[in-house]
Image: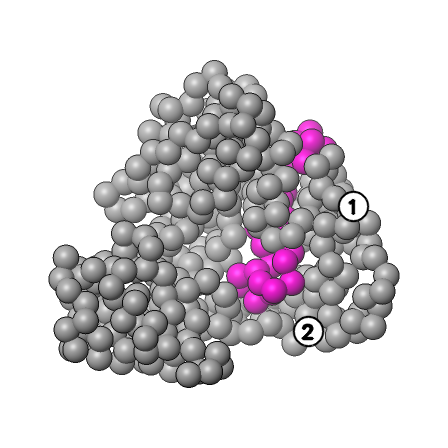
Amino acid sequence: MSENDILKINFNESQFGTSPAAIAAMREVVGQVNRYPEPFSASLRTALGRFYGFGEDGLEHVVVAAGASGVLTVIGRALVSPGDEVVTCDPTFGAYEGLARANGGKTVLLPVTEGEVFDLAAMRAAISERTKLVCVCNPNNPTGTLVDHAELVDLIHSLPEGVVALVDEAYLEFADDEPGQTVMPEVLAGYPVIVVRTFSKIYGMAGARVGYAVSTKEITEKLAHKVPVFAAAREGLAGAIAALADQDYVAHTRQKVAESRAFLTGELEARGWHVYPSQTNFIYADSRRDTAALAKALRARGVLIRGDYEYSRITLGTIEEDKRLLAAIDEAIGAGEVPSR
């Protein structure tokens, strides 16, 4: 089986491609790759500042790095020192624990709720005099769930002095009500919060490695000191600016993902699975069978999903791709390759 025959739905890449405008913009600058990109990604930061309502002050509120992971590395270097604590929940994106460990900090890992949602009350109670960051992945990876927005705002408003909320909204553009769920207004109001986003997911530019953080002037200044001069490639910056301007394509991708989410959720529930309510481009589903064995059986059939969590994390694709996944699941279970738990 060639690589082109494999259905890769394990990395949460967009299965719906990239804005044609972004591709055209990247092609325009390919012949200029002998030159370094714009220092400190100034044009993209300015464009993002306008997009989120900061007017021409984007340079003072936005930093850009190599994907959301690169942004999280910057945040760790800027805000976490040996002995500091980073409070988050588990399971979630492993980079939060990584940014603490890399800078001599300690991660305080709390369990998610029974519904696989971040436990904000437990996080607030866990804040100590050593806490520097509280990290909320919203929607959460790998569970796909959203926290209650009012409770998240209350958490941000109640933080002790010196504690910063890191809210990772890498997947929020897939949510049915993004404007009602984002905490960007809390940044505009001056609260100690960093919003992390990326062009890797709904914008379909995972290979370009462009992520960014939006925060207050004071926090952004601290982050900016830890960002390399050439943090993002020339092609990535050009593509990101064009993609940001093409919100019609974003809406198109959001709609296709929503259709896939409804279809695959219904099909898996009809097979007896429990699918947690997702607001992302993936689902987190309990097959009631051995999760790792299921992933192994699907891999043998050319379908890649994540099988290293408690339950299966599956990237949403086209309806045709969903049907291929379902056929592989039915075949593997029917062949007795996936024991019940």
Q: Which circle marks residue 23 in the picture?
A: 2
Residue at the (63%, 39%) spot, across then down: 74
Give percent across and percent down for residue 130: 49, 19
Mark 2 or mark 1: whose residue is earlier in sequence: 2
Decide whether residue 173 is among the magenta residues.
Answer: no
Which residue is at the front of the view, 28 or 328?
A: 328
User: For mark 2, does the 10 Å Cα neighbourhood hold few (<14), some (14 to 19), or many (20 or more) residues?
Assistant: some
Give percent across and percent down for residue 83: 51, 21
Q: Quadrant of residue 27?
A: bottom right
Residue at the (71%, 54%) spot, across then down: 232
Q: Mark 2: which secondary structure?
A: helix
Tag 2: amino acid:
Ile
Q: Is residue 336 left or right of residue 250?
A: left
Tag 1: amino acid:
Val
Residue at the (41%, 42%) spot, across then down: 149
Q: Quadrant of residue 32?
A: bottom right
Q: Is residue 270 visible?
A: no
Residue at the (78%, 54%) spot, across then down: 43
Magenta segment boundaries in residue numbering: 197-223
Residue carrying label 1: 229
Which residue is at the front of the view, 304 or 50?
A: 304
User: For mark 1, does the 10 Å Cα neighbourhood hold few (<14), some (14 to 19), or many (20 or more) residues?
Assistant: some
